[in-house]
Amino acid sequence: MELVDGPLGGQLLDVTGWSAEGVAGGALLITDVGLFGPGGRSDYIPESGGGGGYVWNGDTP
């Protein structure tokens, strides 16, 4: 799954083995390069229109 925009944009997320519900729910990923620095998380949600990637939805501490 390609991550679009945000601090992890352009990277790929391996969703092999994830359930369909898990993939549809998006991902909250730990990152050191987001708005909140080390230990912060970046929220990625499925692209609207079925584009096949996850779009950045913001950062959280």
Image (cartoon, grey):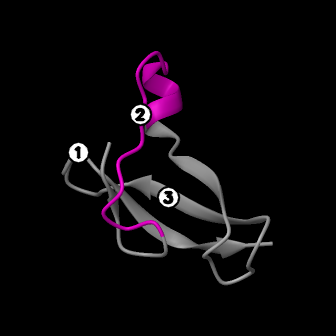
- With respect to residue 5, does 2 lie above or below? above
Give percent across and percent down for residue 20: 42, 22
Compare marks 1 and 2 and give the one earlier in the sequence: 2
- Name the residue beneath numbered marker 2: 14
Q: Main secondary structure of the magenta part?
A: loop
Residue under label 1, please give it: 52
Contact, mark 3 vs mark 2 (Cβ under 8 Å): no
Q: Determine the image quadrant of residue 59.
A: bottom right
User: Quadrant location of the C terminus?
Assistant: bottom right
Specify the label residue 27 is tagged with.
none
Residue type at mark 3 is Tyr
Secondary structure beneath dot 2 equals loop
| Picture residue at 35% right of the left edge, 47% below the top | 12
The residue positioned 49% from the left and 74% from the top of the image is 7
Count of numbered tags: 3
From the image, state whether disc 3 or disc 2 is nearer to you: 2
Instruction: Give the magenta range.
Output: 8-23
Give, as a three-letter code, the residue at label 2: Asp
Indicate yes or no whether the magenta region holds residue 12.
Answer: yes
Up-down: is 56 above or below 45?
A: below
- Find the distance from the CA under tag 1 to the CA under tag 3: 12 Å
Which of label 1 and label 2 is nearer to you? Answer: 2
Image position, residue 56 (x, y; %): 45, 68
Image quarter for residue 16?
Answer: top left
Q: Nearer the viewer, residue 23 or 2?
A: 2
Local secondary structure at mark 3: strand
Tell me the CA gap for discs 3 and 2.
Answer: 13 Å
State yes or no: discs 1 and 2 in contact (Cβ < 8 Å). no
Q: Which residue is mark 3?
A: 44
Which sits earlier in the primary sequence, circle 1 or circle 3?
Answer: 3
